[in-house]
Image (tube, rainbow, N blue to C red):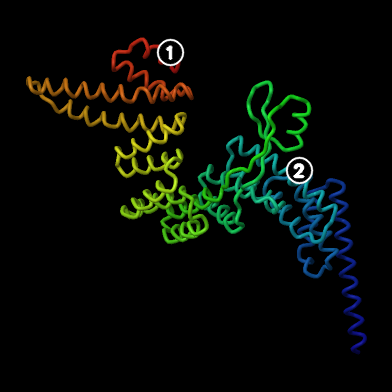
């Protein structure tokens, strides 16, 4: 009786295995004939049988599922995600799986870039995440997923990607190759083979290579900022502590922590960190700019102006610093206007009015050089109109007319 039972079970297993193989062959046939609707239906049908398949059959199933959902690049994002998941379950070193992996990666890269350039950032983020799932040897895909999420205002999504990058100890540091375009005189970055070929063809000169800047501090900073904005200050401070321990000399991290401490109302700690950052890197224009922004946010206009000017001494073409400094100067105008409007018509009031009017003109004249430098570097309509209005207020009518004609 036992032998008969064993034989019956063996026959059942054999029949079941035969049925699986038959269905797998049907799946492969549907994929081969580009009948992806039928192929996807077979994938769903076979799903409950996967647990009883041997490894070889499982690989065939997952490969068929990946092909079915990818649909030779015609699938929507939802199905591509399923294709990526299926492909991730294929074991071993299958040449067919590797080829499909390359096809999916190339297709996803094209689509993710198209979504990004067309400002469909939410779709771009999904695309870059799928790219990472296809090729986990390139975590830069996660970085671009995070950037896309930030642009899509999806802070939770960005946080997820940034934490994944932090767990991977991703820095983004890599070697880049460059050469100068002989026709334009501009330096261009490209892969090594292309660079070497252009130099050989004499279309480019001055070839070189360098390491890119680390993205580690940027990633940590964004994790901290997102947690802080979510009100999870403990997590924000924990990440900051970790980053500071890893990079004790990074002055930008000090500025980020100072900003966090300021938001928490810890002004003494804020001042301490600001001074520490400045002592570590007193001639860093970006640091000085950040310090200026923080000082302005804290209501210390005098200190902010000092930092902006120091930053501009090192990098005189920083249009953000020039614009912000002009805005700080012009911010004093409203107080003067309020005082002028509060005056009466007495002789003393008239004298005070003239005095305030001259102060207002002084403010305009102090701001003008910074706004003019912005327009020289980057013609900007908003700045152009602002400067035209200021020219009009100080009697420079010809200059005002020229700018209005240019920017209106």
Q: Quadrant of the C terminus?
A: top left
Mark on residue 35? none
Residue 118 place in picture, x, y as percent: 60, 35
Badge 2 crowding class, 10 Å Cα cut-off, few under 14, some 14 to 19, many 20 or more, is: some
Q: Quadrant of the N terminus?
A: bottom right
Pointers 1 and 2 in contact (C-beta within 8 Å): no
Eyeballing the image, is 342 above or below 239? above
- Which residue corresponds to the image point at 76% horizontal and 48% vertical from the top-left? 70
Residue 122 place in picture, x, y as percent: 58, 44
Could you say which is closer to the camera, residue 186 or residue 380?
A: 186
Left or right: 250, with 203 as reference point:
left
Eyeballing the image, is 211 above or below 189? below
**Picture quarter containing residue 396?**
top left
Circle nearer the viewer, 1 or 2: 1
Which of the two discs, 1 and 2, labels the residue nearer the N terminus? 2
**Picture quarter containing residue 20?**
bottom right
Left or right: 375, with 182 as reference point:
left
Eyeballing the image, is 299 above or below 316? below
Q: What secondary structure is marked by label 1?
A: helix
- Which residue corresponds to the image point at 61% horizontal and 44% vertical from the top-left? 123
Could you say which is closer to the camera, residue 101 or residue 328?
A: 328
Would you name the residue on which mark 1 appears? 405
Residue 144 place in picture, x, y as percent: 61, 45
Mark on residue 73? 2
Could you say which is closer to the camera, residue 391 or residue 250?
A: 250
Q: What secondary structure is marked by label 2?
A: helix
- Which residue corresponds to the image point at 52% horizontal and 48% vertical from the top-left? 218
Q: CA distance from mark 1 to mark 2?
A: 50 Å
Left or right: 367, with 220 as reference point:
left
């Amino acid at each position: 009786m036992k032998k008969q039972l064993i034989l019956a079970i063996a026959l059942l297993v054999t029949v079941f295995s035969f049925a699986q193989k038959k269905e797998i062959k049907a799946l492969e046939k549907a994929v081969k004939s580009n009948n992806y609707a039928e192929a996807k239906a077979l994938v769903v049908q076979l799903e409950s049988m996967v647990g009883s398949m041997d490894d070889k059959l499982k690989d065939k199933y997952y490969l068929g599922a990946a092909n079915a959902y990818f649909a030779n690049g015609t699938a929507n994002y939802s199905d591509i995600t399923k294709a990526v998941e299926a492909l991730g379950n294929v074991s071993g070193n299958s040449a067919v799986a590797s080829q499909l992996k390359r096809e999916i990666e190339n297709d996803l890269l094209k689509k993710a870039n198209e979504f990004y350039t067309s400002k469909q950032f939410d779709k771009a983020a999904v695309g870059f995440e799928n790219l990472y799932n296809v090729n986990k040897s390139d975590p830069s895909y996660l970085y671009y997923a995070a950037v896309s999420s930030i642009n899509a205002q999806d802070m939770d999504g960005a946080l997820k990607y940034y934490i994944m990058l932090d767990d991977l100890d991703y820095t983004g540091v890599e070697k880049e190759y460059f050469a100068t375009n002989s026709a334009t005189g501009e330096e261009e970055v490209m892969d090594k083979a292309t660079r070497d070929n252009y130099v050989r063809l004499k279309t480019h000169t001055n070839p070189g290579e360098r390491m890119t800047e680390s993205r580690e501090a940027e990633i940590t900073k964004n994790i901290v900022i997102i947690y802080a904005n979510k009100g999870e200050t403990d997590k924000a401070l924990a990440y900051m502590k970790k980053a500071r321990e890893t990079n004790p000399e990074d002055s930008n991290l000090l500025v980020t922590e100072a900003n966090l401490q300021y938001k928490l109302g810890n002004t003494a700690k804020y001042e301490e960190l600001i001074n520490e950052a400045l002592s570590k890197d007193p001639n860093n224009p970006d640091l000085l700019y950040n310090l200026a922004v923080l000082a302005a946010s804290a209501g210390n206009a005098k200190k902010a102006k000092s930092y902006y000017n120091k930053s501009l001494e090192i990098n005189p073409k920083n249009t953000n610093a020039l614009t912000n400094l002009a805005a700080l100067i012009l911010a004093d105008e409203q107080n003067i206007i309020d005082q002028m409007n509060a005056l009466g018509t007495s002789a003393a009031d008239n004298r005070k009015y003239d005095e305030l009017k001259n102060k207002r003109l002084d403010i305009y004249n102090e701001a003008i050089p910074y706004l003019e430098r912005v327009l020289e570097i980057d013609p900007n309509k908003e700045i152009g109109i602002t400067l035209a209005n200021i020219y009009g207020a100080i009697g420079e009518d010809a200059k005002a007319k020229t700018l209005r004609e240019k920017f209106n």
